[in-house]
Image (cartoon, helix red, strand yellow):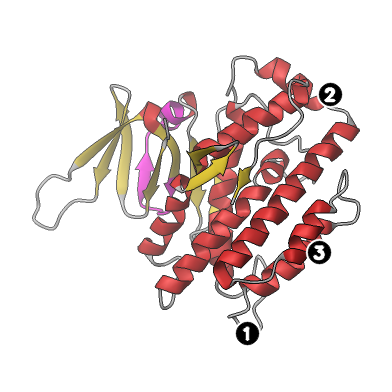
Amino acid sequence: MIKQVLYFGNRARLSTAHRQLCIELQPANDGKPPPIVTRPLEDIGVVVIDSREVTMTASVMQGLAENGAALIVCGPNHLPTGLMLNIDGHCEQTERMRHQLEAPLPLRKQLWQQTVKAKILNQASAAHKVHGAEVGCMTAWARSVRSGDPDNMEGKAAAYYWRVMLSDYDGVTRDRYGADPNPLFNYGYAILRGITARAVVSAGLHPSMGIFHRNKYNAYCLADDLMEPYRPYVDLTVMDICRRYEQPSLECKDVKRDLLAMTTCDVKIDGHIRPLMLAVGESAVSLYKCFSGSIKQIHYPEL
């Protein structure tokens, strides 16, 4: 079952009762008691807090963690600044992490090769969908990715991809601190990262031990690895938002709603159609099976 993504951008008080998340909304102007909405804790996958006027009890954080939900907290710029996950995501966690830590370097290089190839192919599909661009060079680069990507085909494809995707924005390049629509990409990637980290923990793996990313200051290296082929889904969502809104901004609640809706978009993976959130979970489980030696290919989406 697909889990719910709950977003809070206005004043609200969160508590729990009878295994339900109780949401007390801001009071109405007519003086009546504020309405209370409930959601089963077991049905929640992600909670996004984007307001300093949201308060919650300790039982809320405990209930979310016990049910495997991710809690994302945003800063004044509306971009996520914190992520809380449970620490016992799977009953076989110790054994699974041992397989992860003992994975030999050749295997990790092969898994990164698969990841980069899937990412480039999905980028090619996204560029063609948005601008009808010629992407034969990208598919050729995807076929040329070697174990560990020593030729940096990922970087070569990214340079071409972003020239195409941002061709309607004079002087704008893909940069974390760049001009619009970069903040929209940042927000979408941050939500995707939280979903992926949750999937990694649920699969019994440790999010800090990546197959390629290994920055000692990064607590989510494996999530950053696994989310790479999913990034084009965020890119397509952002491009669609830019087409439909005259001046899209994270200050607009409708824009953030559309970005969060990306988590339920249809994804083709392993011959089946899944909501993106479930597809990420399938990728995480298949990654563990690669670590354990039961399969050789990570299940990644095809855009």
Question: Of discs 2 and 3, which sits in the foreground?
Answer: 3
Decide: marks 1, 2 in contact (CB < 8 A)? no
Q: In the figure, residue 106 lies in which quadrant?
A: top right
Crowdedness near tag 1: few (<14), some (14–19) or many (≥20) residues, C-alpha within 10 Å: few
Q: Which residues are magenta?
A: 48-64
Mark 1 or mark 2: whose residue is earlier in sequence: 2
148 sits left or right of 232 in the view: right
What residue is drawn where x is 45% and y is 25%? 67
User: Which one is nearer the viewer's eye here, 200 or 148?
Assistant: 148
Residue 143 in magenta stretch:
no
Task: Give me the disc on residue 102.
Answer: 2
Where residue 136 appears, x then y in whole percent? 74, 65
Q: Is residue 20 above or below residue 143?
A: above
User: Disc 2 versus disc 3: distance between alpha carbons?
Assistant: 31 Å
User: Which one is nearer the viewer's eye here, 251 or 295?
Assistant: 295
* Residue to which mark 1 is pinned: 170
Q: In the figure, residue 298 lies in which quadrant?
A: top right
Mark 2 or mark 3: whose residue is earlier in sequence: 2
Q: Is residue 245 above or below residue 203?
A: below
Q: Is residue 44 above or below residue 250?
A: above
User: Disc 1 versus disc 3: distance between alpha carbons?
Assistant: 21 Å
Residue type marked 1 = Asp
Where residue 274 appears, x then y in whole percent? 49, 39
Number of marks in the rendered image: 3
Say which quadrant the N terminus sits in: top left
* Residue to which mark 3 is pinned: 156
User: Disc 1 versus disc 2: distance between alpha carbons?
Assistant: 47 Å
Which residue reaches farthest bottom?
Answer: 170
What residue is drawn where x is 53% and y is 49%? 191
Mark 1 secondary-structure assignment: loop
Residue 61 in magenta stretch:
yes
101 sits left or right of 283 in the view: right
